[in-house]
């Protein structure tokens, strides 16, 4: 098994089709070159070449299903890979049963997928679950989720169209694994097409949008889910409510305090889930979210009044 296990893992569970999807072709590969590669296995009735943003993918349709199966089986077991102009070509079954040459916008391969998640409400599938499922195929740059009349949708941005196509081929029509879903969701299907977007504009890290390429992007304070309610103690005085989210004010700022610095300081007590930094009344404040109250309480007790740097700086 090679390092491309992300591409491999669905290869053998795909439904055979007389249309094959070829990836990693030389740029502007000619139709004749495709025919040359495929004709030893049977009669080719249609091709669609130069697909995808890098124009390095193609579809080939055989006259008969068994011809397509024989080509896939041959290269799956052969020690020599399929090659065009010395480049290794990856071959898998298409999720289409025939090539339709009038392209609809959702069929023009791009690096951003539009995913409709059927059978769920917006809160049922977290952005982390979406990230986990789609990361199996390559580095996910950005995700934005939203609710439309069509249902709960997500835009998922990859580096290139080849990666996006591989994810679409493997996941379109499938379900998110059961163990990643809340108990009340029976089934959810993914319907995937290509988006016309090429670069998503993500302004905040939040429970609705993420940019995995930019660790310095601010966290939207509303994305920190602490429930704050007023608690009255036995003496009738207002007690500060306990929460898994700490509000830290940082005084005597002689040095810059970044998200990374705070992460280092607060991670000593447990896993930090989220950090948001903002200015208030000319001073700097931060929200730090832990998984539970206990960890937050321990961190608060230990760090209250302490300095990040020697000499009393950044208290």
Image: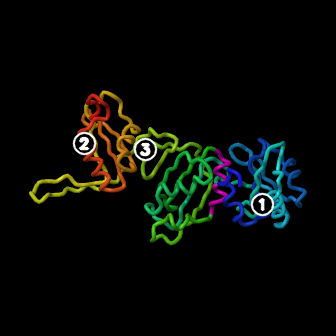
- Please name the predominant secondary structure of the magenta segment in the image: helix
Q: Is 173 part of what is drawn in magenta?
A: no
In this view of the protein, which residue sits in the foreground, 257 or 141? 257
Toward the left, the furthest residue is 235
- The local crowd at label 2, few if under 14, some if 14 to 19, many if 20 or more residues have their Cα within 10 Å, is few
Q: CA distance from mark 1 to mark 2?
A: 65 Å
Up the image or down, 16 lies above or below 29; here it is below
Indicate the position of residue 161 as horizontal and vertical percent values. 66, 47
* Precedes in sequence: disc 2 or disc 3: 3
- Quarter of the view holding residue 13: bottom right
Dot 1 falls on a residue whose secondary structure is strand
Q: Which residue is mark 3?
A: 204
Up the image or down, 268 lies above or below 60; here it is above
Up the image or down, 271 lies above or below 187; here it is above
Dot 2 falls on a residue whose secondary structure is loop
Q: CA distance from mark 3 to mark 1?
A: 41 Å
Q: CA distance from mark 2 to mark 3?
A: 28 Å
What residue lies at 60% left-to-right and 54% top-to-bottom? Answer: 136
What residue lies at 65% left-to-right and 49% top-to-bottom? Answer: 163
Q: Which label is found at residue 27?
A: none
In this view of the protein, which residue sits in the foreground, 279 or 47? 279
Q: Which residue is mark 2?
A: 304
Q: In the image, is 124 to the left or to the right of 240? A: right
Q: The magenta stretch spans which residues? A: 160-172
- Quarter of the view holding residue 264: top left
Instruction: Classify the position of the N terminus by image quarter.
Output: bottom right
Q: Which residue is mark 1?
A: 19
Indicate the position of residue 89 as horizontal and vertical percent values. 78, 49
* Precedes in sequence: disc 3 or disc 1: 1
Numbered disc in front, either 1 or 2: 2
Indicate the position of residue 116 as horizontal and vertical percent values. 55, 60
């Amino acid at each position: 098994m090679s390092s491309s296990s992300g591409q491999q893992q669905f290869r053998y569970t795909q439904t055979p089709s007389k249309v094959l999807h070829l990836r990693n072709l030389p740029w502007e590969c000619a139709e004749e070159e495709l025919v040359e590669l495929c004709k030893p296995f049977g009669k080719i009735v249609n091709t669609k070449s130069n697909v995808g943003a890098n124009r390095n993918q193609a579809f080939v349709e055989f006259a008969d299903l068994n011809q397509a199966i024989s080509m896939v089986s041959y290269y799956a077991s052969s020690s020599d890979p399929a090659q065009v102009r010395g480049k290794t070509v990856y071959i898998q079954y298409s999720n289409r049963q025939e090539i339709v040459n009038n392209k609809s916008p959702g069929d023009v391969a791009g690096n951003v997928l539009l995913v409709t998640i059927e059978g769920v409400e917006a809160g049922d599938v977290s952005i982390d679950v979406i990230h986990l499922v789609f990361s199996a195929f390559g580095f996910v740059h950005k995700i934005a989720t939203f609710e439309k009349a069509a249902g709960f949708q997500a835009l998922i941005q990859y580096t290139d169209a080849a990666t996006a196509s591989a994810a679409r081929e493997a996941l379109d029509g499938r379900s998110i694994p059961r163990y990643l879903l809340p108990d009340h969701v029976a089934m959810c299907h993914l319907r995937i097409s290509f988006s016309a977007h090429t670069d998503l504009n993500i302004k905040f890290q939040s429970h609705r949008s993420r940019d995995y390429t930019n660790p310095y992007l601010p966290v939207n304070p509303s994305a920190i889910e602490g429930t704050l309610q007023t608690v009255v103690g036995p003496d009738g005085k207002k007690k500060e409510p306990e929460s898994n989210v700490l509000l830290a004010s940082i005084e005597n700022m002689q040095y810059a305090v970044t998200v990374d610095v705070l992460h280092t300081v607060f991670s000593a007590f447990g896993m930090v889930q989220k950090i948001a930094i903002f200015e208030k009344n000319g001073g700097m404040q931060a929200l730090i979210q832990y998984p539970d109250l206990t960890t937050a309480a321990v961190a608060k007790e230990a760090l209250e009044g302490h300095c990040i740097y020697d000499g009393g700086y950044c208290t």
